[in-house]
Amino acid sequence: MSHCKICTSPTNDIITFGGMPVANGFINVVGQDEFVFDLTVSFCTHCFMVQLKETVPPEKMFNDHYHFMSSTSQGMAVHFEGNAKEIIDRLAGRPDSFVVELGCNDGPMLKHIAAKGIRHLGVEPSGNVADLAQKNNVRVLKEFFNQKTAAQIVQKDGQADVICGSNVFCHIEDIHSVFTGISVLLKEDGYVYFEDPYLMDIVEQSSFDQIYDEHVFYYSGLSVRELAKRHQLELVDMVHQDVHGGSMRYYLKKGAGYTVHPRVEEFIAREKSLKLDQPAGYASFKDHVNQICHQLRHTLEEIKHKGSRIVGYGATSKSTTLLNYAKIGPALVDYISDNTPYKINKFTPGMHIPIRSYETFLEDQPAYTLLLAWNHRREILEKEKEYRRKGGKFITFFPAVTIE
Ligand SMILES: [Zn+2]
């Protein structure tokens, strides 16, 4: 029996992936020790939060080389610039406004706020990433965000008009500490927004590779509304984002009694129609996940059987869950190409597929490519027009296995 990290009620298991290495645990040598934990997702019928049952101690997750730089994708760069523009528009006419971003990464959003001369602060605990943000002229506090850091910020800079976070809230197990900090830092008439992979997209597309050690919470309108209430905040709007395979941006305000955008009720009604407020809604998810794994393995085996070669594209953290659960290793996929320097010549966690440079892929022209970075599908198909023109094919797998 495990208990909800939000409300302490007993939770129900939705799906168990079994022993799983950490998603970012790329290894130097096959045979080296790998930390394995039980990857199980559970659901709370009381506050509707979908969450990891067992979490991994942070020291097992992040190593010296860990630095996710969000600016590397052109699509994401455009997305963050759009986020900044929205903030700038909303703050128009408010004198001396102050924007705080939690987990600002290397500053892909805040650099646009900084460029407008708007007072801002990024709170970023990863030192090397924070240094990169500073190079982008972003003001950074190298700390974890909680009540104490919030009080420090208020003392120095005053309260914030906007507090935001992108792909940050889903990573933080002690999310209550973040919301307690928000209560301290947010102005009475300020607003909060955060965006994370959307539970309904994960369920509808069966995109279970979003589930890995670093993603503790899988938010929905149902669960965010409850979580906000606990911290005297109100969920006032939800805007769907076409990034990371489907994300949701949630807008919160202090207190209650606001005019809530009709979208909130519409999204929650759709979530309820999928029964995401009860265990029954997750039973078919588990079946679909197993179907996709079976279908994908079968497709890859058939291709190999016919004598063609398959490589992977994008040694993403999230592909760790897919590769390990579907048992896809070097017997099926020769290597995975990636352009992150520190991953090249390492091996994927658990399944030990070698990682090669992007140039290797370009020179190689393999017959089939498993598109592990499927959430950038459109951008990648466009970039690899030449590969496809020469007859190369991409294999994708959500919501079903497709060769194109
Ligand atoms: Zn709960």
Image (cartoon, rainbow, N blue to C red):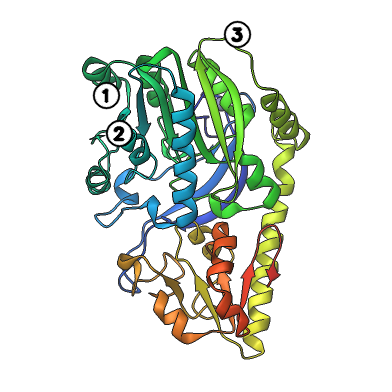
Question: Is disc 1 placed on a helix, strand or loop?
Answer: helix
Contact (Cβ within 8 Å) of mark 2 with mark 1: yes
Q: Which mark is on residue 123? A: 2
How far apart are labels 2 and 1 at the CA level?
9 Å
Side (left or right) of 255 relative to 288: left
Of residues 286 and 340, the one nearer the viewer is 340
Q: Which-is-in-front pick, marks 3 and 1? A: 3
Q: Which amino acid does label 3 sit on?
A: Gly
Which one is earlier in the sequence, the residue at label 2 or at label 1? 2
How far apart are labels 3 and 1 at the CA level?
29 Å
Q: With respect to residue 93, does 66 lie above or below?
A: below
Report which residue position mark 3 lands on. Answer: 257
Which one is earlier in the sequence, the residue at label 3 or at label 1? 1
Question: x%, y% of residue 171?
Answer: 43, 40
Of all residues shown, which one is farthest toward the right?
273
- The local crowd at label 2, few if under 14, some if 14 to 19, many if 20 or more residues have their Cα within 10 Å, is many
* Residue at image location 68% in from the left, 82% down from the top: 302
Which one is earlier in the sequence, the residue at label 2 or at label 3? 2
Q: What residue type is labelled 1?
A: Thr
How far apart are labels 2 and 3 at the CA level?
30 Å
Report which residue position mark 1 lands on. Answer: 149
Of residues 284 and 365, the one nearer the viewer is 365
Q: Quadrant of residue 93?
A: top left
Question: x%, y% of residue 279?
Answer: 70, 36
Question: x%, y% of residue 137?
Answer: 25, 41
